[in-house]
Amino acid sequence: MSPAGPARDTRGVIVVATDVTRDYRMSGSIVRALRGVSLSIPEGDFLAITGPSGSGKSTLLHLLGGVDVPTAGNVRFLDRDLGSMSVEARASLRLREVGLVFQRFHLLPMLTALENVELPLAAVGLGPGERRARAEERLVRVDLGDRLDHRPGELSGGQRQRVAIARALANDPAIVLADEPTGELDRSTSRSVLDLFRRLNDDGTTIVVATHDLELAEGARRRLEVVDGRVEA
Amino acid sequence: MLARTSLRELRHRPLRTALALTGVAVATAMLVDMLMLGGGIQRSFEELLRSRGYELRLSPRGTLPFDTEATISGYAELRDALASVPEVAGVAPVLAYSISVETTDSPDEPQTSLRALALGIDPREQGLLRLLEGELPGSGEVLLDRRTIEETPLSVGDTVDLRVAGGLDVAARSGRARVSGIAEFVFSAREDRPIALPLEDLQSFSEMGDVVSFAMVRLTDGSEPDRVRADITARIDRVEVTTLTGIVTEANERLSYFRQLALILGSVSLVVTALLVGTIMAVSISERLGTIAALRAIGIPRMRILRALTAESLALCALAGLAGLGLGVVVAGVLEDILSDFPGLPQAVDFFVMRPSTLLLAYLLLLLVGAGAGLVPAWRATGLEVASLLHAEEP
Ligand SMILES: Nc1ncnc2c1ncn2[C@@H]1O[C@H](COP(=O)(O)OP(=O)(O)OP(=O)(O)O)[C@@H](O)[C@H]1O
Ligand SMILES: [Mg+2]
């Protein structure tokens, strides 16, 4: 990994999955969630991964973001082999370079919107002042500048998901990975989340979403269909 | 930041938190009481003995140090023999004898009578009592226990009849004495009603001759009790000599029952605390597994999450512990009242001795156990595989 070596060739590429397989052991039998998937996400991409339920979308997303590691094949994230990293090293990489968005938001109910966004900033060691300023800026970016001190319970589903997106953006990650981000939202709210993703992507954020939501999928720059653990051409 | 959620999390579930707080507070109270009991009675007894300043105790050979039935004969001779030991600074003789005390006939008051243990002492050299009012008894005078004064119409200056009921080998006798003062008899059990009078008076009243039940010996400064003990034992063969340390050891053996009880119950209360905090934390953590998985997924270090969850159990214990300390002190007072009726123990001995160090120890033990108990489910939850957790928690 010398700066003049292969790093040059992969410049502009965030993550590369090569022939990735993921098996899960389930009470004796083995479930093959992914069967030899290869994929490359360039900087600035907005990719939608679609496919039937159980086809392996979430699994692929987790592998791309280093939440999980493949059983076979390899994933290189910013030219680092995720499979050879320790659990805590991957956690540290995710904290700084991956913004995760979940279907169920997973905000801390006891913290305000601002505090929820401050959380990953505190974890990288930022002081209170800078933390607050950055969190505020992220919330303004997702149009929640007027909801800083609201707790998740006082926000609508769409607003909560935007807080979660602001949290994902907190540490300026190289990529945002969203798993079924509109799964709990109605059509019009889903559309506003799509608009937000497009705007963020236009500003340069690399985004991958796994979704059933056709409107969201069609709004992405690129679409990839996963069926039964394989990428359909 | 994360730790801040802990207190809010506790406040968010008021009923559960209140129940857990109460449980931990009660367990803490028990822990405090058992720590107070475990060390208290023993130290309080030792302090009591040492405060009187008599390092040696002479009892009839072949008897236990607290046996008051047997006697040492020829006290005058004994005293003279002791006087020839250079380290002996003073001798306090004690003769114990059961008699009954009656108020003298008076037209306007009903007569009262009580069985008392009469202690014949040398008023100038004694370590059994603390004078509260009046004077030490001279010839023809008695000193009454504080409680006797409380329970009877007697007061200082009154006259009482002392009686010995006749039996097979003793003739009935009676005599009269003036109440010279009121004292606290520090070694007497609470149920006893001791009185004190000059040794010579009791010797002649009991018709027992020049005997004493035991004698206490004060030593000159800097002398070694063990050496003097050996010296006296060599010179006088009809007495058993026990040092204060020996008496304390003996007493400690008799009190080991309380210490074992305290140790067991104290451990039980810690185990109960651990189970309670562990259960509460396991339940509330399992409710938040999805959130914990998400926090791990976005890369929050495991240590941070552990710290926050531990802070939660610590906050619970810290709060409940304070209430528990207070409760423990109150309950100790109640138990002290009940236990001080335990027969045969000196009334001046406290079962529950409250020391700041004891309270601090209880509090620290509690925090340690509470933090440990919270750490177990937290450690398990944060160690689970993130992807599997997310798979299980997301629909
Ligand atoms: N941690 C796991 N343990 C066991 N099996 C798993 C695990 N994660 C995924 N699987 C299995 O792998 C397969 C793919 O699951 P995955 O969640 O990736 O599908 P998906 O495309 O995201 O489905 P959905 O659209 O319902 O979210 C499924 O059969 C699933 O049961
Ligand atoms: Mg999925």
Image: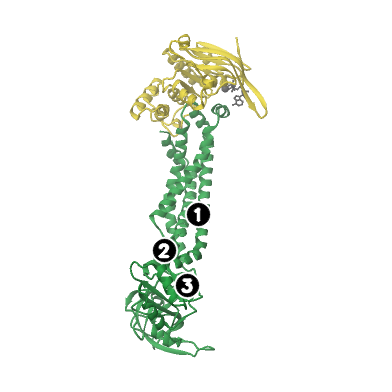
Chain colours: A yellow, B green
- In this view, the residue in front, B181 or B254, is B254
Same chain under badges 1 and 3? The reply is yes
Does dot 3 land on a helix, a strand or a loop?
loop
Residue at mark 1 to residue at mark 2: CA–CA distance: 20 Å
Residue B21: x, y in percent? 47, 47
Q: Which residue is mark 3?
A: B65
Q: Which residue is mark 2?
A: B44
Residue at mark 1 to residue at mark 3: CA–CA distance: 32 Å
Task: Tell me: residue B122, above or below residue B167.
Answer: above
Quadrant in which residue B3 is drawn:
top left
Q: Quadrant of ligand 1?
A: top right
Same chain under badges 2 and 3? The reply is yes
- In this view, the residue in front, B134 or B213, is B213
Same chain under badges 1 and 2? The reply is yes
Q: Amino acid at mark 3?
A: Pro
Q: Can you see residue B109?
A: no
Q: Which residue is mark 1?
A: B266
Quadrant in which residue B222 is drawn:
bottom left
Badge 3, how many Cα within 10 Å: few under 14, some, many 20+?
some
